[in-house]
Amino acid sequence: MSNYKNIDSALIHGGIYGDEFTGSVNVPIYQTSTYEQPGLGENKGWEYSRTGNPTRASLEALVAELEAGTHGFAFGSGMAAITAVLSLFKTGDKIIISSNVYGGTFRVLNKVFNHFGITYSIEDTADTKTLDTKITDNVKAILIESPANPLLTITDIKAVSTLAKKHGILTIVDNTFMTPYLQQPIKLGADIVVHSATKYLGGHSDLIAGLAVVNDDELAEQLAFIQNSTGGVLGPFDSFLLIRGIKTLGVRMDRHTKNAEKAAQFLLENKAVKKVYYPGLKNAQGYEINKKQAKNGGAMISFELYENYDIKTFFKSLTLVALAESLGGVESLICHPASMTHASIPYETRQKVGITDGLIRLSLGIENIDDILSDLQQAIQKSEVK
Ligand SMILES: *Cc1c(COP(=O)(O)O)cnc(C)c1O
């Protein structure tokens, strides 16, 4: 292993570096489904690529190191990673989720895991005092996002983990929005970290992938069993692409977050803007907690325009910032949570948790910030209803 102390170096040298056979500085793409065995009952550590593949294994070692866990697991999507983690639970078990979790996480619990008698309840995980009273005997885990999607609500990861430990249940953190470069939940006491690596880790909007990291050998054994049994693994080529993306995570996140800080300020001072949600703003919900547990406020901003701005015209008028689902790519992306990412959440629930029809979510890319801001400004101007 190379000698380094900082995550910036681990992003490049972490996990399994290069190739011992050729000296290649990059891990080769082992595009194979199976491995020839020297004799009956003998193998070179690899048998079949659903169970294990060297390119995927190198990615798994890398993410385990970055998230300060013991074992990593790579899946075909973020939802496949979350599904594998939820498969740790049994009929009768209940999972508490934050009120702003990713729409797909809500959907898989509400429409798939409920078939197997695994239930959930939505709680305000930012309020740990009340949360304590919600942990009944059948609650087996708390699944949180901080910041949570799309209102960027901050949950105290350390406080929730401490509470979960007290009750002998698991803390699962979806760290997609922050990445290990900005926040490491396992160091704060979490048991499992999941990622949609489709977002910042991949970073180029060119692949779908998911990751899970655990900090315990027994959990690792169970998750490895589920990964191999249910089979939603990431292929070798996508594993390679993800390793490639992760190498530049540090420099990308620095630019993403610098752009977000400037954009948040721009929106805050804009007369067309009614509300700005960004954990890096001093008056934001959870600002102090976020400052303690993360490097900065991340690069996602949500905002609302005043009623005399037509959001359909606003979205149509953008020329640089792309109207699209997803986030975390080098290009700035903007979306309308109520009709896009969070459409699977019933209208009443959306209203209750604050996902209004006027809410806009912006993922700051790494373009020049002046270009991004002037695109937003001209679209705001065009959308004003006179
Ligand atoms: C996108 C996303 C997911 C789902 O990941 P996929 O790769 O699209 O399956 C889960 N959690 C969060 C926070 C996300 O943004």
Image: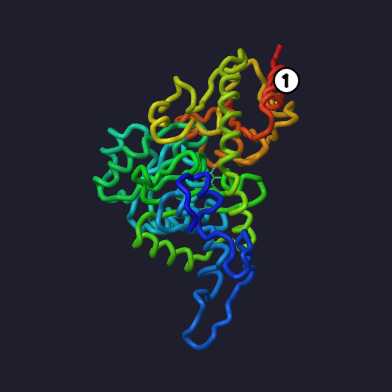
Q: Is residue 386 above or below residue 244?
A: above
The answer to which of 77 and 37 lies nearer the viewer is 37
| Element at label 1 | helix
Q: Residue at x 64, y 68 (%)?
A: 31
Where is residue 176 drawn, in percent x and y?
Answer: 51, 43
Between 230 and 339, the one lying in front of the other is: 230
Asked which quadrant contains residue 89, the reply is bottom left
Count how many numbered circles sit on residues in the image: 1
Q: Residue at x 69, y 32 (%)?
A: 321
Residue under the point 35% across and 61% down = 217
Q: Is residue 37 left or right of residue 31?
A: left
- Position of 199 with respect to 323 (left or right) is left
The residue that disc 1 covers is 378
Query: Most extreme residue toward the front, as rendered?
Result: 3
Residue 142 image position (x, y, % from top left):
36, 45
- Which x, y percent locates residue 41? 47, 85
Residue lying at the far bottom in this picture: please name it: 40
